[in-house]
Amino acid sequence: MKKQVIIALGREFGSGGHYVGEKIAEYFGITYYDRRILEDIAEEKNIRIEYLEKYDEQRRNVFFSRSVKGYTNSIEEIVAEMQFEFLRKKAASGESFVIVGRCADEVFRGDERLVSFFVLGDLEDRIQRVSKQHNFSREEAAAMIARHDKSRKKYHNRHSEVKWGDSRGYDLCINSTRLGIDKTAKLLEAFIQERTGLEPAKK
């Protein structure tokens, strides 16, 4: 039976974590999941994808939500739990995969199949990357980074006892500015092979 590995990748906005995750999945020939899991959830539950995307990786609004006997009316919490359950089902199926974000490091914490990373980057490098990708000014890119990082931090810290980006919560934290995106992916691929014995896909 082929070894199962779950690779969870947290990331700062603009650090290239999304691309690194894709490269790792391609190298090992395993499934890559990101916010597109919402498409599967929307289809399964017959919900409009735009509705789910609005609340993706968002912390609940404490002014418009409450919990009673373990049940919540917070849409943000419900969407988060839908994604957690989706990932648990995929893991239970025996599938190996890379998942970016979605608090996967917490969902599978303590699971021997888990390898977790956090990708960060120098701010100026991230500003340049976001500016180029979105054709933004430097000021617009910096504002977008600050907004997304703040949102991700609040979301993660809501669902995890380990703080977002805290090195103690991951197998490895890496600054993508130091080696560049492609070499960062290669380094993490080597780490995964050494740690788990997972072999690359045959070309």
Image: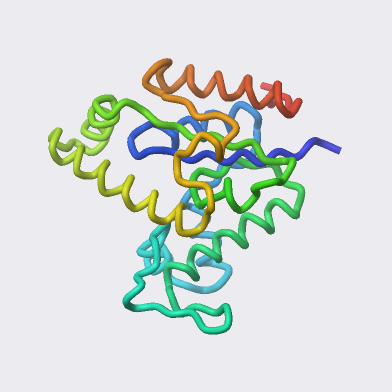
Q: Residue at x 38, y 38 (%)?
A: 12
Q: Residue at x 27, y 29 (%)?
A: 123
Q: Quadrant of residue 52?
A: bottom left
For residue 140, side relative to residue 110 (left or right): left
Residue 86 rendering spot, x and y as whole percentages: 61, 59
Find the residue positioned furthest to the bottom.
68
For residue 113, side relative to residue 185 (left or right): right
For residue 87, side relative to residue 54 (left or right): right
Q: How is the image coloured?
A: rainbow
Where the N terminus falls, by quadrant?
top right
| Looking at the image, residue 16 lies above or below residue 203 | below
Residue 133 rendering spot, x and y as whole percentages: 27, 34
The mark total stands at 0
Q: Residue at x 23, y 44 (%)?
A: 144
Q: Quadrant of residue 99?
A: top right
Residue 69 rendering spot, x and y as whole percentages: 57, 83
Find the residue positioned furthest to the right.
1
Q: Which of the pair 68/41 is nearer the observer?
A: 68
Residue 84 rendering spot, x and y as whole percentages: 58, 59
Q: Which of the pair 125/106 is nearer the observer?
A: 106
Where the C terminus falls, by quadrant?
top right
